[in-house]
Every structure is written in structure tokens, then in C-alpha cells.
Image (cartoon, grey):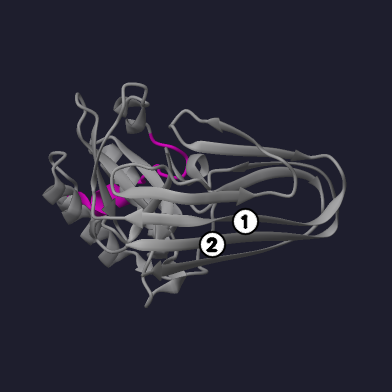
Amino acid sequence: MRLKIRHRTEYRYETPVRYSIQELRLTPPSIKGQEIHKWKVSTPIKSTSSIDTFGNVCNVFVQESPYTSMMIEAEGEVHTQDAFEFIDDAKAVSPYYLLQQTHLTEPTEEMLKYFSANLPKMNSVDEVLKLAAAIQKTIEYSPGQTNFATTAAQSFAMKSGVCQDHAHIMLGLCRASNIPARYVSGYFFAEESPNLASHAWIDFCSDIDQGVWISVDITHACLVDSRHIRLAIGRDYYSAAPVKGVRSGGGGEELSASISIQQLA
């Protein structure tokens, strides 16, 4: 598919923000399954670009003059095709590092007991998809119940969440089963589900020695396909977040985000 994507994030503040640093992972890579034909990230002031530990393109900008609103926009064209297997290059983070839990993924004993019959015995596609289906069935997709700071344990306790929560629970259970797994942030194209445009899923390592990773969408309990556009990877949401930052001042914050994905002829 040829997809045109536009992602706009706008912040408004009660009082002037005196100083802020923003870190963006809004540039999709050209890799197997997706080819980037045009892409532009627009920021209030010039940003500096670098490659982070996980190989993501990271843009950073610092604002030192007071402001009460800020707009960040990413847009471009991506050509996609079905692909769910990815092979790391020699400089990639070791899969063993991705066995470590984080605050957002750490499973409770109750979670491990609940999913015990579905925990993978080996790092095979069938075993991991079985776990994904169990999570999808247990954790109802329910926008507005959780936020970016919600942990896997909290989402499990509520039995509700969104794709980010599905991914964190899956990461925690894969890692507890001694399977390296990483968080993937991105976009999902489905005309019937515009609220899923901003999406998250996971990669699990099927061959540690060769650095082979298989991408699984827990929200849909399937392997990823041409509907998925990868933005960034990390240990959890926080290390792969499309937009994050810190600020001094500003008081209350109002955030509005919109994503449009249009299929081109």
C-alpha cells in the first residue's frame, strides 16, 4: 500500500513555559516491509538529529524563550508490504538486554499464575501467538481507562487498556518466559478503526544467535502486515515514545493529537 500519514501534536499551557526539552521519535525507518518516500518532522525551532541506542532516529530541540503553545508535526509517504520478520544488524542492542523487565512491564505473581497455561515454552511463532490471543481475550480494549504511565500490572488488574497496555503485558510475560522482547511504536492503517492509527505492538526474538525478531500485534492477535508502519523500538513505551519531554513552568497542560492515514492510488 501507498500511505500518506500526517501526525500533529499540539500542547497548550495555563501559564508560560520558561524552558523545555523535547525528544521525538517520529521518523519511520526504511526497512523490510516499508519504504519511506517522503518524510518531514516540523518543530517550533530547529532540532538536532541523532541515532539512539536502538537505532531509532531521534530529534531533540530545546526552547529557552517563554511560550504558551507548541505544535509538532510529522508527515510523509510510506510504501508498505507484508513483513513480520526482521534481522538485526551487527550494531544492534543484544537480545539478552531485552530480557530485563522495566517498571512498566514487570509482571505480578497473579499475572504469571493467570496466564500460566499460555506462557510460551519456546520462542516459536505459534507459542507466542497463543499468548497474544490470551491477552487480547483478557484485557478489553477500552480507550480512556489508562495512560502513558500505566503499568502492565495495573492494566491487568483492571482487565482493560489499549494497545500500549497489551504490549507491556506481552513484554512482561515473554521476558518472564525467558524470551527477549521489545516494544514497537508506530501507526496502523484501518479505515474502520481510526482510533487505532497510533499503535503499539512487540517484537520477540526467535533466534538469539542470528538476531531474528518476529513482530506480533497483540491487540489484533496476529503477525504484523502491510497495515503496520514502524516508528521506533525500545524496552517499553517510554524508550520508544513518539513525543516526550520535560518542562519548567506552564502550569496545567492541554494536549491534543491527531493522526490521519490516507491510502493513495
Instruction: Locate the C terminus and report the quarter of the image it occupies.
Output: bottom left
Do the residues bearing badges 1 and 2 touch, measured as CB atoms within 8 Å?
A: yes
- Left or right of 260, for residue 157: left
| Residue 76 drawn above or below residue 49 | below
Question: Mark 1 sits on what residue?
Answer: 73
**Residue 147: which disc?**
none
Q: Position of residue 220 (x, y in %)?
A: 28, 64
Q: Position of residue 152 (x, y in %)?
A: 41, 51
Mark 1: which secondary structure? strand
Badge 1 or badge 2: first in the primary sequence = 2
- Left or right of 249, for residue 127: left
Q: Position of residue 261 (x, y in %)?
A: 45, 67
Question: Which residue reaches farthest front?
Answer: 265
Q: Is residue 112 magenta?
A: yes
Going by the numbered disc 2, the residue's amino acid type is Arg
Q: Is residue 43 magenta?
A: no
Q: How many marks?
A: 2
| Residue 260 drawn above or below residue 105 | below
Going by the numbered disc 1, the residue's amino acid type is Glu
Instruction: From the viewer's side, name the closer residue of 12 and 144.
Output: 12
Instruction: Locate the N terminus and report the quarter of the image it occupies.
Output: bottom left
In the image, what residue occupies the spot 60% across and 39% down? 59
Question: Mark 2 sits on what residue?
Answer: 6
- Left or right of 130, for residue 6: right
| Residue 106 drawn above or below residue 211 | below
Tell me the CA gap for discs 1 and 2: 7 Å
User: Local crowd at mark 1 within 10 Å, few (<14), some, or many (≥20)?
Assistant: some
Stretch in magenta: 101-116
